[in-house]
Image: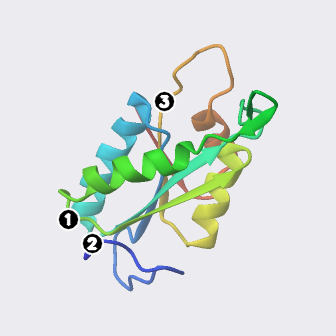
Amino acid sequence: MANRLPEGRFETGKDGAGILVVGYDGTEPSRNALAYAVGLARRDRAGLLVAFVECLNSASFWFFAGSPIIPDPAEDLADDLREEMRHHGVPWRFVSVRGDAARELESLAAAHMADAIVVGRSRSPWHASVARALVRRARRTVLVVP
């Protein structure tokens, strides 16, 4: 695909945003964050690193008849993204990691020298949000999209 970012470190060598890391899990807030990041990337001629972080405390393993069935939500998201991103003309790459979402997004941003991290607002006011943790922890701009 012509608009895919190459593997490895991204090099842009220009003013403005070069790389934006986008937290994406398929929910409406993450879709809003992706849409915002696509527009920003298009205006700045930047690339997107779209990241799905599977939390280790989620129900990752389901058991059926004594055999573990390990769902792969990242592969489903990657398929959806390939279709959606085809029409935007923005270079992008999808990665899937496991761990604490805020920590992993910041690690990816640091590893790829990203200019900003874009995430959607929390879906629930009852738990600690990834956006809040990133705002406290991140060493770069964090954009929280409603």
From the top left corner, tell me how far across and down residue 130 is, in percent: 62, 36
Most distant residue in the top direction: 126
Q: Which three-letter amino acid code belongs to the residue tagged 2?
A: Asn
The residue sitting at 68% across, 41% down in the picture is 70
Most distant residue in the front direction: 65
SS class of the residue under badge 2?
Answer: loop
SS class of the residue under badge 1?
Answer: loop
Q: Name the residue that disc number 3 marks.
A: 121
Q: Name the residue that disc number 1 marks.
A: 89
From the top left corner, tell me how far across and down residue 37 is, in percent: 34, 51
Q: Tell me: 27 left or right of 130.
A: left
Q: Quadrant of residue 17?
A: bottom left
Q: In which quadrant of the rendered image does the C terminus lie?
A: top left
Most distant residue in the right direction: 66
The mark tally for this picture is 3
- Are dots 1 and 2 in contact, CB under 8 Å? yes
Q: Which three-letter amino acid code belongs to the residue tagged 3?
A: Arg
The residue sitting at 32% across, 56% down in the picture is 82
Q: Earlier in the sequence, mark 1 or mark 2?
A: 2
- Few, some or many C-alpha atoms within 10 Å of disc 3 (few <14, some 14-19, many ≥20)? many
Q: Name the residue that disc number 2 marks.
A: 3
Q: Tell me: 126 left or right of 45.
A: right
Q: Tell me: 101 left or right of 12.
A: right
- Few, some or many C-alpha atoms within 10 Å of disc 1 (few <14, some 14-19, many ≥20)? some
From the top left corner, tell me how far across and down residue 113 is, in percent: 55, 72
